[in-house]
């Protein structure tokens, strides 16, 4: 069975999780004290008591403030998730996983199996325990492909759990408890969709941790980081589109929107790094490309910064994140101007042969055309190039200084040496380039350089989760095919019917597989006498369970009976008396129920599962035709896929 990683192995990350959990407990305690104090404050008219309570409230509130700051500092422990390589990579923002409480499903599921399925719940203890072990393991997934598979496996298993045990009208009476990944505030809901949504959130969060760990100084590392952040964006986007009314803030539409944008920005930053790795040449066109890629990164980080400072998100996002994003947008703007200057000052003026190509690239390079001479003159006159280059450097240096100023305002980021190093290295590089091209005899006023037009050669993709890549078998398949034996269907108790074959056989027609359906009953035949009705499902023959049996197997069992006859067990679905619903099998495709509204995700999911999963999903296959003509039992053809027995 799947294992989570050992939560007690004192890795950096588990220490972090334990501290987070401890702070969460303290926050909860303080919140309870605050609620109690507020109630007392409202209820009492005694001034002395009011004063004491007010004092206590201010104490509790300042405590809460400190705890929240401590929690924020933990959430910004990006170094725990960063790689160990020597080379400097700018830190990325990973997300912590949502924590959850243990869940005991043994009694609720055993009860439901007895009540709804009419089976002995005790006989399913093994399956229930296996499900609970899987849930336990997925609480602490390892930070790699195996951890992702574990979360996916559990997510897919929830599809079966939902269809088996969560009827549309009733809930199991079990609460799913999850903590907000950023604030640690607990939420609980009875809807299974909250459990699904939280697992999906953790799939996204785990991708962010994997992305932040990669060594982006190498091409394979950068590509892995791009893939991880794109998949994280896909998970958060899928969650936003398919679940609604989440009880916790981290899964609200506005937070998820912000997270998708943040991941896209991190992908764009990796794309910039990839271009710097691939384009080692220092020719004019390459430097222009780097400047435009950097402008593109600035563009997406500005958008994230705007999103983070909106009303619903502002108080919720850690200050260190907002600052980091702001710093990056200024830093990449500075870089775009720096590379523009390098293109103009370090690359030789265009020769006549190169001119058309350089002109074409440069005409789309600036947001507005720079003042001064025509493009042609500019590109071929070293002095004009130097002038414009100097204007770009002046702007770069201003932006570097702005990035460093914003960085210094955040206590938590000040502790991050890597970011500090990157910013000051870039600043010094621009300063030294400036002093290199600055002439003492320059009397011209350095103009204002126009901004660089953002452009990227690799647009980030939002990669939706591919649930079908992890195949799972329904743990509770012994309950029978889901097409009939599901939470939303009800059936009358099993009837045991004794049949003796007459000269015209048993007098019924059968259709389909798993379970085989009685499609028609001949008036006056043995089956009709014994009380069988069309629409009944055969679930046993002579005590042998036939819920999963194929058409041919059931026919074989019926054929092999002698004079003494045969005992068959049948059930009738409630509300389906009559043949209309014989093919209700497709109905299993749409199951509602959810978090939070009706969760569109289910119906799409079962279709995915039908393509994937195991042999146990035969009920989803389309070929329900039985090959009757091969049976030697006497029959009259009733239809191309029914046979009379």
Image (cartoon, grey):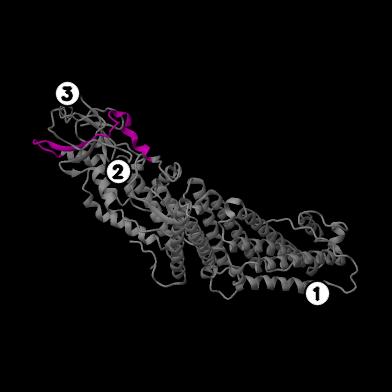
**Foreground: disc 2 or disc 3:** 2
**Foreground: disc 2 or disc 1:** 1
Q: Which mark is residue 481?
A: 2
The first of marks 2 and 3 along the sequence is: 2
The 10 Å Cα crowd at callout 3, few under 14, some 14 to 19, many 20 or more, is few
Q: Are marks 2 and 3 in contact (CB under 8 Å)?
A: no
x, y percent for residue 230:
55, 56
x, y percent for residue 87:
60, 74
Q: Quadrant of residue 559?
A: top left
Residue to which mark 3 is pinned: 524
Residue to which mark 1 is pinned: 436
Above or below — where is 346 with respect to 484? below
**Foreground: disc 1 or disc 3:** 1
Q: CA distance from mark 1 to mark 3?
A: 106 Å
Left or right side of 172 for 557? left
| Circle 3: element type | loop
Above or below — where is 229 with respect to 165? below
The first of marks 1 and 3 along the sequence is: 1
| Circle 2: element type | loop
The residue sitting at the left extreme is 564
Q: Residue at x 16, y 23 (%)?
A: 524
- Residue nearest the viewer, comparing 356 with 521: 521
Q: CA distance from mark 2 to mark 3?
A: 32 Å
- Residue nearest the viewer, comparing 492 with 176: 176
Which range is magenta? 560-588
The first of marks 2 and 1 along the sequence is: 1
């Amino acid at each position: 069975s799947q294992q989570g990683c050992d939560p007690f192995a004192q890795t950096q990350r588990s220490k972090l999780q334990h501290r987070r959990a401890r702070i969460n407990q303290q926050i909860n305690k303080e919140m309870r004290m605050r609620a109690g104090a507020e109630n007392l404050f409202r209820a009492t008219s005694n001034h002395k008591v009011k004063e004491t309570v007010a004092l206590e409230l201010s104490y509790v509130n300042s405590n809460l403030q400190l705890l929240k700051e401590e929690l924020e500092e933990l959430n910004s422990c990006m170094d725990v998730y960063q790689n160990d390589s020597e080379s400097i990579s700018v830190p990325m923002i990973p997300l912590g996983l949502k924590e959850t409480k243990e869940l005991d499903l043994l009694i609720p599921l055993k009860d439901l199996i007895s009540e709804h399925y009419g089976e002995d719940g005790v006989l399913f203890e093994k399956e229930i325990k296996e499900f609970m072990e899987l849930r336990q393991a997925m609480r602490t997934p390892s930070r790699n492909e195996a951890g992702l598979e574990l979360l996916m496996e559990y997510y897919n298993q929830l599809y079966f759990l939902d269809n088996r045990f969560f009827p549309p009208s009733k809930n199991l009476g079990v609460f799913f408890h999850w903590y907000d990944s950023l604030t640690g505030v607990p939420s609980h809901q009875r809807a299974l969709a909250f459990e699904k949504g939280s697992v999906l959130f953790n799939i996204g969060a785990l991708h962010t941790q994997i992305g932040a760990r990669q060594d982006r100084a190498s091409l394979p590392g950068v590509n892995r980081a791009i893939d991880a952040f794109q998949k994280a964006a896909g998970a958060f986007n899928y969650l936003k589109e398919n679940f609604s009314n989440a009880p916790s803030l981290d899964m609200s539409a506005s937070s998820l929107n912000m997270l998708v944008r943040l991941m896209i920005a991190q992908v764009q930053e990796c794309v910039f790094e990839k271009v710097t790795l691939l384009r080692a040449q220092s020719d004019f066109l390459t430097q222009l490309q780097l400047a435009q890629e950097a402008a593109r990164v600035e563009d997406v980080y500005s958008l994230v910064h705007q999103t983070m400072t909106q009303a619903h998100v502002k108080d919720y996002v850690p200050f260190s994140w907002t600052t980091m994003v702001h710093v990056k947008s200024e830093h990449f703007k500075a870089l775009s101007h720096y590379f523009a200057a390098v293109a103009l000052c370090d690359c030789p003026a265009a020769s006549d042969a190169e001119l058309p190509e350089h002109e074409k690239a440069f005409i789309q390079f600036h947001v507005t055309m720079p003042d001064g001479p025509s493009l042609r003159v500019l590109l071929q006159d070293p002095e004009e190039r130097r002038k414009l280059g100097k204007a770009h450097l002046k702007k770069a240096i201003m932006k570097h200084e702005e990035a460093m100023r914003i960085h210094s305002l955040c206590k938590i980021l000040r502790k991050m040496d890597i970011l500090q190093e990157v910013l000051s290295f870039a600043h010094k590089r621009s300063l030294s380039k400036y002093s290199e091209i600055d002439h003492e005899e320059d009397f011209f006023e350095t103009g204002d350089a126009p901004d660089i037009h953002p452009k990227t050669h690799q647009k980030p993709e939002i990669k939706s989760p591919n649930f079908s890549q992890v195949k799972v078998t329904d743990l509770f398949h012994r309950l029978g095919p889901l097409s009939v034996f599901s939470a939303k269907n009800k059936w009358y108790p099993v009837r045991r019917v004794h049949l003796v074959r007459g000269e015209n056989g048993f007098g019924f027609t059968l259709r389909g597989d798993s379970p085989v359906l009685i499609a028609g009953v001949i008036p006056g035949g043995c089956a009709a006498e014994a009380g069988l009705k069309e629409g009944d499902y055969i679930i046993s023959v002579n005590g042998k369970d036939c819920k999963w049996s194929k058409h041919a197997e059931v026919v074989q069992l019926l054929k092999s009976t002698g004079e003494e006859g045969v005992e068959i067990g049948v059930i009738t679905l409630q509300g389906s008396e009559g043949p209309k619903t014989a093919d209700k099998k497709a109905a299993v495709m749409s199951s509602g129920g959810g978090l939070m509204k009706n969760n569109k995700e289910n119906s799409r999911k079962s279709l995915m599962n039908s393509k994937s999963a195991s042999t146990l999903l035969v009920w989803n296959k389309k070929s329900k035709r039985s090959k009757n003509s091969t049976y030697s039992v006497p029959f009259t053809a009733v239809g191309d896929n029914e046979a009379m027995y």
